[in-house]
Image: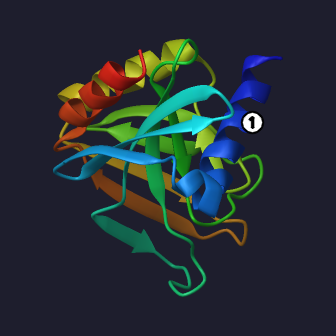
Amino acid sequence: MKNFEKIILLTFLLFSLPFSNVVRAETKLLGSEKYWKAYSTKISKSKTCFITSTPIKTTGKFDRENRGNPFVFVTNTKGGAKHEVSIKAGFNFKRNNDVIFNVDGKITKLFPVDDRAWSESSKIDRRLVQSMRKGKKLVVTGTSSPGNKIIDTYSLSGFTKALRLIDKSCS
């Protein structure tokens, strides 16, 4: 299976299964570090860990009642992917528009699929995580399918400590 297909499958599982009663019982909070939470879960027999955060600020023209919850994730799969960065926007992105991932002025373009976005490679993920460890603020800018620019700002306070929790649990 190609990397992209693995990413799509893992993301589908991470975002759909944790909300079912069966998997919810297996999803465990490893800890909270300021704005970040660390979790572990078992998908089939594979252990997966992830950290996540929600925006501290959101701007743009959109219907707040119709937007889902936005998140940023960094995911480890035991024996597999490490430090895989992804975004869940809470709205579908406009096709063929990059998502801008900006850590303290360092800009990287992510590719969107529906309401998710990823980098193009694990090498880029490593660079993003390194920037996030050193950074103070992450700004994610995307364009919704109707064409509205939406900006989510995340604090990186607690990121490094939360990342250590999943590195310890899923390495």
**In the drawing, does residue 42 fall left or right of residue 92?**
left
- Mark 1 secondary-structure assignment: helix
Q: Residues within 10 Å of mark 1 (few under 14, many from 20)?
A: few
Q: Position of residue 77 (x, y in %)?
A: 54, 23
**In the drawing, does residue 104 fall left or right of residue 106?**
left
What residue type is disc 1 on? Leu
Q: Position of residue 28 (x, y in %)?
A: 40, 46
| Residue 91 sits above or below residue 12 on the image | below
Q: Residue at x 33, y 57 (%)?
A: 153
| Residue 73 sits above or below residue 45 on the image | below
Q: Residue at x 39, y 71 (%)?
A: 59
Q: Position of residue 25 (x, y in %)?
A: 51, 54
Quadrant of res 133:
top left
**In the drawing, does residue 169 fall left or right of residue 46?**
left
Q: Front-most of 27 and 133?
A: 27
Q: Residue at x 55, y 16 (%)?
A: 122
- Name the residue carrying label 1: 9
Quadrant of res 167:
top left
